[in-house]
Amino acid sequence: MTTTDHDELLKVRDRYDAQMRRDAQPDTPHARVERVGGVVRRTERGLGWNGVLWSDLDEDTADAEIAAQVAYFGARGQEEGGPEFEWKLYAHDRPADLGDRLLAAGFVPEAPETLLVARTEDLASLPVEPPEGVTLRVVTDEAGVDLMMEVHRRAFGTERPRIRQQLLSLLREEPDTIEAVVAMAGDAPVSAARMEMRPGSAFAGLWGGGTDPQWRGRGLYRLLVAHRARVAAARGIPYLQVDASDDSRPILERLGFAVLGVTTPYLWTGGGA
């Protein structure tokens, strides 16, 4: 797959929209996904992610649906401890001014991400030999998850309790849907990433790739992509998908990923226009 395969990319995007958004299945044991009106939304108690995955709206229905979701999550937040939720907007979503309508309703856009996809078979042949002194550790328990969280702290400068909870839940209850891996330099975790695989889906999602700043530029990011590609290939999953930051996009494109579009998280925290 290349960026010049325009017709093929549109077909893959349609398949992605159908499987991962419109007909999305719960991606953790305690998540709920439901289609209500013109949207598909995901909810989860505790630290789980809450938001709108997909919408089928037009100029006449968009504002009312936005208001309905604000009301729903606002009421839900009174029970759960906060109304925050995300509307995950894709550039090809309709109506074309949906982002402006979300802004007018009080949502705040976060940094856009590029939706990238690659054929698993094209990446499974990437070299997987780690640099000298580095070994790969597949995460299967809480100790491994804590190593991943240590990498995230070093790589991104933030704590990620929601991701920690999600990983622990998946490893306990649905271990076949997750592949998490840490690159270790001796006893020190220096790079980490995960892959989420839903039964029956053609797409495996690559998430959380990060490397300790002192270890960047040594091929660890590529190593973890290659490892996960081989796991996905062995499962018969045809595509890998990434919501890429501006930092990771050029690396992934060099590895063979192609652009499907741009997605922007619009966050509601209880404010208003």
Image (spheres, helix red, strand yellow):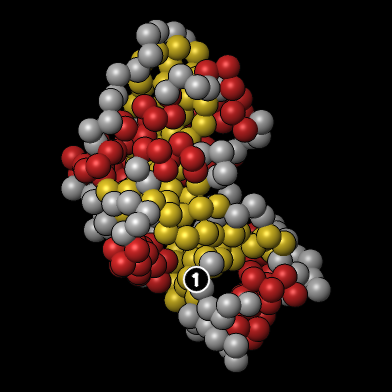
Give the position of the C terminus as an image quadrant: bottom right
For image coordinates 37% across by 54% down, the residue present is 3
Quadrant for residue 158, please give it.
top right
Quadrant for residue 206, please give it.
top left
- The percent position of residue 5, horizontal first and vertical second, equals 31, 59
For image coordinates 52% across by 26% down, the residue present is 211
Mark 1 sits on what residue?
Answer: 92
Q: Relative to the observer, which residue lies in front, 145 or 188?
A: 188
Whether residue 208 can be seen here: no
Q: How many marks?
A: 1
For image coordinates 42% across by 23% down, the residue present is 219
Describe residue 243's horizontal placement relative to residue 195 as left or right: right
- The percent position of residue 272, horizontal first and vertical second, equals 79, 71
Quadrant for residue 86, please give it.
bottom right
Whether residue 217 can be seen here: yes
Query: In the picture shown, does residue 4 fall above or below 143?
Result: below
Describe residue 123's horizontal placement relative to residue 111 as left or right: left
- Residue type at mark 1 is His
